[in-house]
Amino acid sequence: MVRTQVQLTSEQSRILRQLAAARGVSVAELIREGVQLLIATSGAADRARRIRLSGRSPWQGGFRSGVTDLSTRHDRYLQEVYGK
């Protein structure tokens, strides 16, 4: 685990302590659960997992055109498609 420091409002801290006591867990555990919920609902975890499983860099495109000279002849290919 990584130790992280956060600042909470007095009310957030009070409510978290009450919830932790009621559930019999630590405040840190509630914060970890909240962070995990945020990650799960944001879709970020799915994207990170897909990238990790693909073996690609997150900056690498997800599709292959099969055209080997696209980077040097892109203007010509666009002209062919759009006729300009």
Image (cartoon, rainbow, N blue to C red):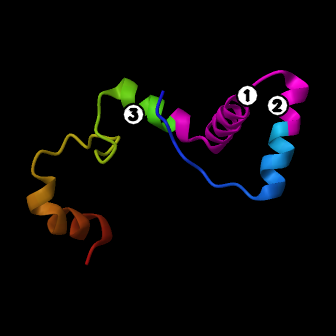
In the picture, the quarter occupied by the C terminus is: bottom left
Gap in angstroms between the C-alphas marked 1 and 3: 33 Å
Q: Main secondary structure of the magenta part?
A: helix
What range of the chain is rendered magenta?
Answer: 18-46
Cβ–Cβ under 8 Å for marks 2 and 1? yes
Judging by the rendered image, the residue that carries numbered circle 1 is 26
Image position of 78 with respect to 7: above or below: below
Mark 1: few/some/many CA within 10 Å (<14, 14-19, 20+): some
Image x and y of residue 83, in percent: 27, 73
Q: Which of the two labelled residues, at mark 1 and mark 3, occupies the earlier sequence position?
A: 1
Q: Which of the two labelled residues, at mark 2 and mark 1, occupies the earlier sequence position?
A: 2
Mark 2: few/some/many CA within 10 Å (<14, 14-19, 20+): some
Q: What numbered label is drawn on residue 58? A: none
Closer to viewer: mark 1 or mark 3: 1
**Residue type marked 1:** Ser
Judging by the rendered image, the residue that carries numbered circle 3 is 51
**Residue type marked 2:** Ala
Gap in angstroms between the C-alphas marked 2 and 1: 5 Å
**Residue type marked 3:** Ile
> Which residue is pictured at 79% across the width and 57% down the height?
10
Image position of 13 with respect to 71: above or below: above
Mark 3: few/some/many CA within 10 Å (<14, 14-19, 20+): some
Indicate left or right for 17 with 3 as reference. Answer: right
